[in-house]
Image (cartoon, rainbow, N blue to C red):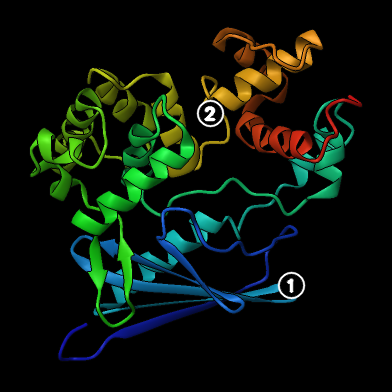
Amino acid sequence: MGDSGPTTVRAEVQPPWPFRLRGRSPDGLWRRRGDAIQRLVHVGDEAVFCGAIQSGDRVVFAARAQTPAAATEGLRRLRFAVGVDEDHRAFHARFRDDRYIGRAVRAAPELRVWRRPDPWEALAWAICEQLIEFHRAVVIQRRLVAALGRRCPQTGLRDAPSAPAVAAEAPARLASFDLPQHRAITLRRAAAEVSRGRVDLQSPDHEAGWRRLAAIPGIGPWTLETLALQGQGRYDQLPAGDLGYLKLVGRITTGRPKARADVSEVRGFFERYGEWRGLAGEYLRLAAARGWLAAA
């Protein structure tokens, strides 16, 4: 990573709430080696190799980069992505006996929303996932990473393509990865807004960035809510247009297995969870996966 040698920053963390380190991701950006997870991120143009390993109730993080500032920022991003510093005590106290998610809340206090270390990555992947099957979106994401992603030769890891890299591509090139033409144009326009600094996804004023992104054709509430939840840590946001939630809420509210709610009905259902609706959505998925909704 440079002639002067890399800098490594470490942190040993005792999570304030039950926690389990998760493994690899379908897009190939996260790698598991034994009990450790590894991820390449970038701070500006500087590569940061990040890793974490859990032993009992302790999690050890390490980040290696050419400069201490980049290593420290990479470490912060990894901790954000895995949610190790979150205390869900208030959520569990409030919803452990909830009619719909209470059993899941009690059974899996360690559950976290799977987040992205960079909000741009969350935005780009959300655009790729619009209105198509998840497995097809993953194939597109893998192609983008292989063609435009940044690679660290020392580790073999790859990072997602940067906003400037995507903005520099013609829509036809992006469409060649199996993105519909109009979605390729949307992705490129979003990348241009971010790379030119017109949208600051790292700013604490998330809403200002959302408003500017919403002016791009093809970016609607679902994309912005996914960005907010997975890229900016906003548990008060829920991608209400997600097909999974449309099916789950339709089934719960009608009792019919194949019923679908509309987006407004999903929003109404999750109002009961207030500022925790994004996390509540993950617990509802878990309850459905374990067959607990029928008893609700």
* Residue count near mark 1 (Cα–Cα under 10 Å), binned few <14, some 14–19, many ≥20: few
Q: Percent position (x, y) of residue 291?
A: 83, 35
Q: Going by the image, does 161 lie left or right of 285? A: left
- Give the residue pinned by disc 1: 57
Sequence order check: which comes first, mark 2 or mark 1? 1
Q: Which residue corresponds to the image point at 25% horizontal and 28% vertical from the top-left?
A: 180
When asked about the image quadrant of residue 268, the answer is: top right
Residue 97: horizontal and vertical position, in percent? Answer: 90, 33
* Residue denoted by label 2: 237
Q: Residue 159 versus residue 225: which sits nearer the camera?
A: 159
Measuring 24% from the left and 80% from the top, which residue is drawn there? 66
Nearest the viewer among 172 and 163 is 172
With 57 as the anchor, is 63 left or right in this view? left
Query: Quadrant where the N terminus lies?
Result: bottom left
Cα gap from disc 2 to disc 1, whole angstroms:
29 Å
Q: Is residue 208 visible?
A: yes
Position of residue 35 measured from the top left corner of the image (x, y, whole percent): 62, 77
What kind of residue is marked 1? Asp
> Mark 1: which secondary structure?
loop
Residue type indicated by callout 2: Gln
Q: Is residue 162 left or right of residue 50?
A: left
Residue 107 percent location from the top left of the image:
85, 48
- The quarter of the rendered structure image containing the C terminus is top right
SS category of the residue bearing label 2: loop
The residue at the point 73 percent across, 19 percent down is 272
